[in-house]
Image: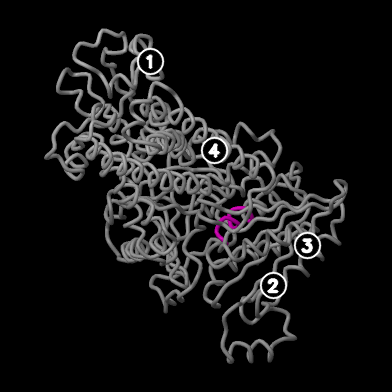
């Protein structure tokens, strides 16, 4: 049964057959079972490889990191401007500076994959490009995580190297053995041209770490990075999304600290002018054995200057781009959203139908939703389940955490005024390309079916309008659910599609298979008892529900046999384990002959 609440004066202009009016009060609502797919496709390690072009992009990124680290390691380990600096610090100088360059490079990249408006723009401009090029945009968060792991690695190297540097600075300051390192550390007594930033024998490493600008900012940005990385684990994001959301906004502190970190210039090298006068290759020995009456040109003390701060040059452009991105999001989110209808589906799934001035969408896109009555700062992504042809846009929300449970409870309460909703988007996903394929296989797990609701609704409208531009000739739809209640809210759409395609003489256009992966004996016995009936006892549809999981090799073999020369797009919104199976099947059943069947895997990510 459905519970619906429509605002007065806002009826849909042309309600489709699957839009149910519902009842005044809800009947029993089924609680979600543990282990169900979350209320939206999760972006993360999706179990799929990015393909050849993606491998090339990752190889290029890795190659640049290796080049930067190697080049600057050798530079600071061999360049004679840092001869005296290495006399105090040894090879730790090269480790610290090389990792710093890689940190700057990856800090430049870390924000770009999360500029959603930029990615949507690129997806639109690449509409005429090869599908393999557009598909790389779907791996944006995979790349974001890869860059984050690189930041964590280089931060560890940089921090450890500088801890060694501080110890060696301190040891050199306290040394009285007349060594080159000890003499260089005492040069601040004669003038301001110091090389060792520690000028007192009473100074400790801890004191420098927490009182100098590089030390304090280094501690702060390292802690911020640790919190962001650790709170991004799958377990935290699934169970404590608020922790992930709030700690991830420490990126602001990270970038501010990164820009400030090098301005004090504690690490120094010999100046160019001083190099010409007292080159260390010829004059280093005179510092150790210099006499008071020394008249040699090398008796003059070398002069040093700080390494200029460079981090701001690396991150300025992406930070400005991201700032514009956030300003655009805020401006768009402040535009009024009218909730025209609220429907409570079985399995505790909430449907919100909304209208917003100037809102334009494509199939498979998603939006970010905020409910100020619950949280002013939390924004959560949801796939649009409406079709572009409809005069509203809709989302389905399943209880899968504190925020989703609270928003469902808020809309279930019969209040005179509807809670205010803010919307940012829509943003593009892989499913936008579904109509670019002759044959499409759509695979949804649990409420992961939501992007395909939009696609199937759009197909219904295209048939209704006799659209002759539809390139897609065949769709295979697979839906995997743990319990029978999850099927209920989607049945009307499938039933209307069955009827419309039969009336249009295209009954074979859509083949769908519903898989029930969790059941009890009574359900199985009831299905066996009514096996010969015209409709399914679980869903009421013509196609029978299959108990168990799909045999993907058999499914792909059948599609390959039926379409031996077609390009088949495989679209998934579901867990990573299922993504691995489908990715493997796509590779196994794609022909090496370019004239024969090819399977292209696409996974919903946001």
For disc 4, the marked residue is 66
Q: Secondary structure at mark 4?
A: helix
Are the residues at dot 3 and dot 4 in contact (C-beta closer than 8 Å)? no
For disc 2, the marked residue is 550
In the rendering, at what x and y percent does residue 566 appear?
82, 51
Query: Could you tell me how far apart the alpha carbons at marks 2 and 3 are, in whole angstroms?
Result: 23 Å
Question: Against 477, is 315 above or below?
Answer: above
Depth check, mark 3 against mark 1: the one in front is 1
Question: Against 104, is 3 above or below?
Answer: below
Q: Secondary structure at mark 3?
A: loop
Q: Quadrant of residue 293?
A: top left
Q: Secondary structure at mark 2?
A: loop
For disc 1, the marked residue is 279
Depth check, mark 1 against mark 4: the one in front is 1
Decide whether residue 159 is among the magenta residues: no
Q: Residues within 10 Å of mark 3 (few under 14, many from 20)?
A: some
Query: Could you tell me how far apart the alpha carbons at marks 2 and 1 are, in whole angstroms?
Result: 74 Å
Are the residues at dot 1 and dot 4 in contact (C-beta closer than 8 Å)? no
Characterize the magenta stretch by its predominant secondary structure.
helix
Query: Could you tell me how far apart the alpha carbons at marks 3 and 4 are, in whole angstroms?
Result: 56 Å
Query: Could you tell me how far apart the alpha carbons at marks 3 and 1 are, in whole angstroms?
Result: 86 Å
Depth check, mark 4 against mark 2: the one in front is 4
Of 311 and 208, the residue lying toward us: 208
Reading the chain from its start, which is encountered first: label 1 or label 4? Answer: 4
Left or right: residue 375 versus residue 531 is left
Image: magenta residue range: 449-456
């Amino acid at each position: 049964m459905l519970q619906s609440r429509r605002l007065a004066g806002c009826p849909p202009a042309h309600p489709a057959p699957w839009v149910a009016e519902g009842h005044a009060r809800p009947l029993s609502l089924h609680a979600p079972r543990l282990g169900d797919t979350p209320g939206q496709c999760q972006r993360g390690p999706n179990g799929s490889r990015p393909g050849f072009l993606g491998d090339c992009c990752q190889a290029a990124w890795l190659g640049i990191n290796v080049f930067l680290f190697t080049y600057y390691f050798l530079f600071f380990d061999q360049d004679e401007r840092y001869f005296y600096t290495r006399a105090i610090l040894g090879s730790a100088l090269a480790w610290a500076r090389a990792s710093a360059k890689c940190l700057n490079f990856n800090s430049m990249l870390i924000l770009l994959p999360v500029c959603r408006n930029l990615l949507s723009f690129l997806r639109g401009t690449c509409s005429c490009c090869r599908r393999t090029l557009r598909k790389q945009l779907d791996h944006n968060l995979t790349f974001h995580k890869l860059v984050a792991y690189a930041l964590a690695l280089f931060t560890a190297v940089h921090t450890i190297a500088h801890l060694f540097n501080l110890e060696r600075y301190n040891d050199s300051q306290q040394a009285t053995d007349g060594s080159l390192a000890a003499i260089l550390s005492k040069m601040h007594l004669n003038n301001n041209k110091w090389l060792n930033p520690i000028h007192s024998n009473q100074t400790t490493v801890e004191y420098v770490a927490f009182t100098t600008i590089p030390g304090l900012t280094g501690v702060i940005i390292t802690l911020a990075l640790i919190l962001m990385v650790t709170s991004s684990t799958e377990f935290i994001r699934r169970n404590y999304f608020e922790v992930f959301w709030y700690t991830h906004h420490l990126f602001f502190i990270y970038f501010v600290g990164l820009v400030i970190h090098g301005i004090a210039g504690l690490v120094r090298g010999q100046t160019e002018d001083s190099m010409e006068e007292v080159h260390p290759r010829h004059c280093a020995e005179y510092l150790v054995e210099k006499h008071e009456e020394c008249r040699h040109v090398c008796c003059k003390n070398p002069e040093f200057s700080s390494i200029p701060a460079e981090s701001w040059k690396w991150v300025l452009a992406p930070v400005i781009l991201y700032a514009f991105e956030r300003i655009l999001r805020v401006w768009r989110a402040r535009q009024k959203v009218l909730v025209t209808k609220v429907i409570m589906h079985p399995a505790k799934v909430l449907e919100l139908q909304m209208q917003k001035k100037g809102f334009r969408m494509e199939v498979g896109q998603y939006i970010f939703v905020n409910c100020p009555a619950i949280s002013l700062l939390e924004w959560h992504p949801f796939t649009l389940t409406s079709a572009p042809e409809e005069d509203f846009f809709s989302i389905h929300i399943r209880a899968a955490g504190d925020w989703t449970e609270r928003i469902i409870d808020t809309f279930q309460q019969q209040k005179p005024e509807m809670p205010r909703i803010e919307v940012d988007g829509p943003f593009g996903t892989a499913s936008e390309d579904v109509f670019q394929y002759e044959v499409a296989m759509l695979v949804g797990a649990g409420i992961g079916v939501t992007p395909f609701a939009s696609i199937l609704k759009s197909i219904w409208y295209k048939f209704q309008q006799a659209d002759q531009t539809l390139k897609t000739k065949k769709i295979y739809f697979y839906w995997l659910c743990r319990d029978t209640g999850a099927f209920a809210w989607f049945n009307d759409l499938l039933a209307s599609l069955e009827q419309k395609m039969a009336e249009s003489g295209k009954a074979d256009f859509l083949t769908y298979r519903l898989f029930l992966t969790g059941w009890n004996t009574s359900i199985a016995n009831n299905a066996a008892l009514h096996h010969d009936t015209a409709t399914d006892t679980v869903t009421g549809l013509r196609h029978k529900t299959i108990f168990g999981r799909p045999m993907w090799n058999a499914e792909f073999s059948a599609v390959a046999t039926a379409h031996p020369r077609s390009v088949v797009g495989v679209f998934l919104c579901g867990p990573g384990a299922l993504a691995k199976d489908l990715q493997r099947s796509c590779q196994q059943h794609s022909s090496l002959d370019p004239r024969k069947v090819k399977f292209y895997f696409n996974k919903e990510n946001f």
